[in-house]
Image: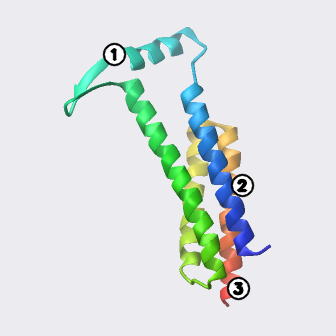
Amino acid sequence: MRAVVWLRVAAVLMVLFAIGHTYGFLSFRPHAAEGRAVWDAMNNVHFSESGSTISYGEFYRGFGLSISASQIFVAWLTWMLASMVGRGSTDVRTIAWGLFVLQCVGLWLSLRYFGAGPAVLSAVAAACFLMGAVSLRRSAA
């Protein structure tokens, strides 16, 4: 399969990852009483920082949404990289390898902290970036 196809598939996976991430962290509600107590405290206890009054729950949502925005950016970047392949850009290979490494880190973090679902998606995305980078290497030789 050509590098363009691998990178386009990776871009679509990144969009799906962003959608799943956003839905997952915005809809998560703990079932156990202890988890609900922590959740309530995160959302009901407010503090002032740098002139703003926020809760840890709002802090959590802000970080989560910034991660979703970054995932959408990676999807866009990957789509643009696939377009650059057709124009013969040699820098695409280096960026594809960087995105592969990023997904490997995401895979490790998913296995460590988030579970099988995100880990599988990270592994498949990493494989697409790997295959895209390897395909670019072959075509550049």
Which mark is first along the chain, 3 or 2? Answer: 2
State yes or no: discs 2 and 3 in contact (Cβ < 8 Å): no
Q: Quadrant of the C terminus?
A: bottom right
Amino acid type at image mark 3: Ser
Which mark is first along the chain, 1 or 3? Answer: 1
Residue 106 vs 41, above or below: the answer is: below
Choose between 57 and 111: the one closer to the eye. Answer: 57
Give residue 69's position: percent from left, percent from top: 49, 47
- Residue 139 has which mark? 3
Choose between 98 and 70: the one closer to the eye. Answer: 70
Labels in figure, total = 3
Image position of 6 (left or right of 104)? right
Q: CA distance from mark 2 to mark 1?
A: 39 Å
Give residue 15's position: percent from left, percent from top: 63, 50
- Which residue is label 2 attached to? 124
Label 1 Cα neighbours within 10 Å, binned few <14 / some 14-19 / many ≥20: few
- Residue 45 has which mark? 1
Amino acid type at image mark 2: Val
